[in-house]
Amino acid sequence: MKAMRWQYVSVIILMIMLFCLPPYFSPQNLYLFDLAQLYSMLAMSLALTVGYAGLLSIAHSVFFGAGAYFTGITMIAGFSFLPALLMAGAFSSLIALVIGFPSLRTRGVYFAITTLCLAIIFEMVLNNWVSLTNGPSGLSGIPKADLFKSFGIKSSTSYHFIISILTILTALVLYRISHSEIGRTMIVIRDQKELSRLMGINTLKYELMNFCIGAFFAGLAGSVYAVFIRYLHPTDFGIHQCFDILAMVVVGGSGGISGPIMGSFFINFFPEVIGIEPALKRVAYGIIIILVVIFMPYGLQGLIREGLINRIGRGFRSWFKGN
């Protein structure tokens, strides 16, 4: 119950932060804030796969990139944003279904290696299918998605509302899934796969369902990324992106919704605001991940939920007793 209350509180805090703080940001910081929100959608979708299915997927950038390129190509061809957004999520889920069915028959490090190979193949396809993706030159000329233009809202604020609404919806939907009967079944399969099979549970079906749901929301994030950045390059969805997404989940914690959000902002927003040199970021990420794995196995989410809150509570109780 405490964990459930913490998740509800974290979503309320997220809503307040998304809609109250940005008006006080500079345009540059608002841009960084919205980019961190996009990556938090991506991290939440991966956390569902890693945390609730126990599947170490390193192919999440494939679904992210598929949604982005699908939206970019279809909008250049004349589609509007909302149909392209939904179709991008469905397209990424379809890719997850195709590659997940054979990949999920492997386990552990073999599954991770399989998904890593898929990420390498995907980047090669983006680089070499020049007639569709424009190859190494990148895909440019993606139209804007001014959904709130009729209300007199300027473009940057319009993007902020689009990203904020989708981030909150992603958090709520994934929270409900993870706390539903499906989510509890996924946890049982993660912890006791052989026993689940003996009980008659179709483990492949639930793992494939988890994989496709995560891919759907990764595709949505990629779709919004395409209209937000308006330029796509294969390196944006390469191997380094795979490990960046995984780093957000590890640093924030994969056992809930609030952890990936905190991990995304910790990695994507705060280093830019305080001005860490780009050359030092990768080194800093590596050191942070090592420290988190050793000292904070449940990430920032676990530290705050189990550590800081309990310490503050004990401090208040002792203070009141002393008085």
Image: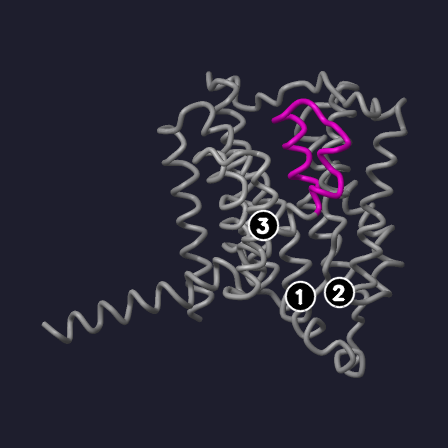
Within 10 Å of disc 1 (Cα), the crowding (few <14, some 14-19, many 20+) is some
Q: Residue 182 carries which label?
A: 1
Q: Which of 77 and 108 is in front in this view?
A: 108
Q: What kind of element bears circle 2?
A: helix
Q: Where is residue 291 in the image (x, y as percent from the top left)?
A: 53, 59
Q: What kind of element bears circle 3?
A: helix
N-terminal of the pair, mark 2 or mark 1, is: 1
Q: Disc 2 or disc 3, which is closer to the eye?
A: 3
Mark 3–mark 1 Cα distance, whole angstroms, equals 25 Å
Q: Nearer the viewer, residue 205 or 99?
A: 99
N-terminal of the pair, mark 2 or mark 3, is: 2
Mark 2–mark 1 Cα distance, whole angstroms, equals 8 Å
The answer to whether 260 is drawn above or below residue 1 in the figure is: above
Residue 310 in magenta stretch: no
- The residue that appears at 20% across and 73% down in the rendered structure is 318
Q: Name the residue under label 3.
A: 248
When asked about the image quadrant of residue 205, the answer is bottom right
| Amino acid on which disc 3 is placed | Met
Residue 238 in magenta stretch: yes
- The residue that appears at 80% across and 71% down in the rendered structure is 202
> From the viewer's perspective, is 316 left or right of 50?
left
Q: Position of residue 6 (x, y in %)?
A: 42, 61
| Amino acid on which disc 1 is placed | Ile
- The magenta stretch is 219-242
When asked about the image quadrant of residue 281, the answer is top right
The answer to whether 73 is drawn above or below residue 125 in the figure is: above
Q: Position of residue 234 (x, y in %)?
A: 77, 31
Q: Which of 65 and 308 is in front in this view?
A: 308
Marks 2 and 1 close (CB-CB < 8 Å): yes
Q: Name the residue under label 2.
A: 206
